[in-house]
């Protein structure tokens, strides 16, 4: 599959050939949904936590003797029956939402989403991505010249470039990721994928070996 290549001025300077094994894969929506759902579950943070009677402070002493008071028997003021006591069946940090998805399925889903981006002209390839100055304004101007417009964009870098990472994070709806870390969920979260030509080789080496 041939796609256009742009320079940083937004001009079309030629074409490049994308590997069929990655960018020309038939879409299976069910597989993509399954993989994306599992990745969302694996990123989920367990925040809600309630204390049970063993975690609540106090209650070491029996409130009153077992018999002879005329009141109901109690062993601790931290029983769930008491105000300030533990919570029964509340949410805890021990919950586990992680799902295991085979590596081949994750890779296949990634190829499907990349193929869909390429077919729908949502894949923008730059000849090179270098910043003369590490300023947000510079990368904003580069993005403005490309067919991205005001849409969300994921920038797939061939390696770690601190300048691009730092300046891009100041722009709303723009995020950077290393090409070797591309995944279906992140691609689905952004409308456009912007990659330099070098990233294609990184993707091939990482996912095809």
Image (cartoon, grey):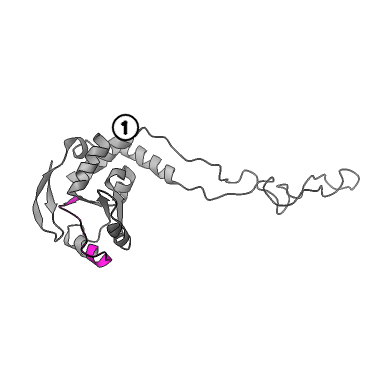
> Which span of residues is magenta-colored?
121-139
Q: Is residue 137 magenta?
A: yes
Residue 115 position by quadrant: top left
Image quarter of the N terminus: top left
Q: How many marks?
A: 1
Residue at x 56% of width, y 42% of height: 94
Q: Is residue 138 left or right of residue 17?
A: right
In the image: residue 163, left or right of residue 4: right
Label 1 neighbour load within 10 Å: few <14, some 14-19, many 20+: few
Which sits in the foreground, 189 or 161? Answer: 161
Residue named by callout 1: 104
Q: Position of residue 9 (x, y in %)?
A: 14, 61
In x, y percent, where is residue 43?
Answer: 42, 46
Residue 162 occupies quadrant: bottom left
Q: Nearer the viewer, residue 153 or 90?
A: 153
- Identify the residue at image location x=31%, y=55%: 175
Quick check: 147 above or below 119?
A: below
* Residue drawn at (28%, 55%) of the image: 161
Q: On screen, 77 above or below 169?
A: above
| Badge 1 element | helix
* Residue 86 screen position, x and y as percent: 68, 48
Q: Residue furthest right?
A: 68
In which quadrant of the rendered view does residue 170 lie?
Answer: bottom left
> Looking at the image, which is closer to me, 183 or 37?
183
Q: Is residue 83 left or right of residue 1?
A: right
Residue 108, position in %: x, y? 28, 35
The answer to if 31 sits in the magenta stretch is no
Q: Quadrant of the C terminus?
A: top left
């Amino acid at each position: 599959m041939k796609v256009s290549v742009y320079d940083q001025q937004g001009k079309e300077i030629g074409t490049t050939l994308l590997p069929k094994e990655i960018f020309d894969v038939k879409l299976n929506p069910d597989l993509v949904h399954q993989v994306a759902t599992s990745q969302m579950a694996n990123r989920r943070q367990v925040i809600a936590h309630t204390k049970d009677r063993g975690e609540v402070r106090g209650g070491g002493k029996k409130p009153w003797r077992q018999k002879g008071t005329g009141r109901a028997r109690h062993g601790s003021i931290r029983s769930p029956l008491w105000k300030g006591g533990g919570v029964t069946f509340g949410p805890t940090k021990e919950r586990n939402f992680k799902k295991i998805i085979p590596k081949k399925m994750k890779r296949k889903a990634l190829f499907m989403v990349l193929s869909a981006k390429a077919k729908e002209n949502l894949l923008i390839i730059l000849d090179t991505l270098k910043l003369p100055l590490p300023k947000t304004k510079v990368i904003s101007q580069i993005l403005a010249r490309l067919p991205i417009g005001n849409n969300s964009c994921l920038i797939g870098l061939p390696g770690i470039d601190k300048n691009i990472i730092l300046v891009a994070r100041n722009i709303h709806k723009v995020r950077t990721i290393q090409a070797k870390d591309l995944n279906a969920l992140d691609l689905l979260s952004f409308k456009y994928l912007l990659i330099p030509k070098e990233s294609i080789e990184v993707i091939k080496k990482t996912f095809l070996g």
